[in-house]
Image: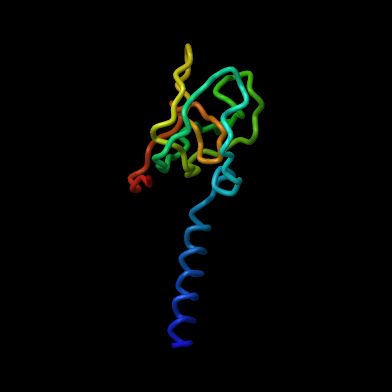
Amino acid sequence: MQKQMFRIAALALLLLAAFSAFAVSPAFAATRQAAAPASAHTAQVGTIVCYYKVTATAGLRARQSPSTSATIEYTMNYNTIVAAYKDSIFVGPTITWRQLYDGNWADGEWLQKTSAQCLS
């Protein structure tokens, strides 16, 4: 029984390590902020999380709120895989923003959905 529990624990650690290796962006590492974005813009927090690839060759800025004047929290490199809400977007006058899993926002034009299954 003890040997079986050890194997289960080892498998769980192996899976955790594999997932951690996949989490290559700060959006995965940061703690998810449950609070609404700090701005005059309002958007409902999403419920379906999908994985997206950054397609902006110069990198993509993650901002505190869906606005180009909002504070830049970090920049995601080209081809970085990031978790974001499929159902949490904010349509601005020129940009459609997508909310990242950590609560920040990014220009949705530069996020391409991957083939990985979304989570709800």
Which quarter of the figure is the N terminus placed in? bottom left
Place of residue 41 in the rendered image (x, y in percent of width and height, measured from the top left): 55, 19
Which residue shows up at 47% across the image and 44% down it? 81
- Count the marks: how many? 0
Which residue shows up at 44% across the image and 26% down it? 89
Place of residue 108 in the rendered image (x, y in percent of width and height, measured from the top left): 45, 28
Query: Residue 51: which quarter of the image?
Result: top left
Which residue shows up at 60% across the image and 45% down it? 30
Q: Is residue 48 above or below residue 36?
A: below
Which one is nearer the viewer's eye here, 104 or 59?
104
Place of residue 44 in the rendered image (x, y in percent of width and height, measured from the top left): 46, 28
Q: Is residue 107 left or right of residue 38?
A: left
Which quarter of the figure is the C terminus placed in? top left
Which one is nearer the viewer's eye here, 46 or 92?
46
Which residue shows up at 58% across the image and 25% down it? 65
Residue most extreme to the top: 93
Indicate the colouring scheme. Answer: rainbow
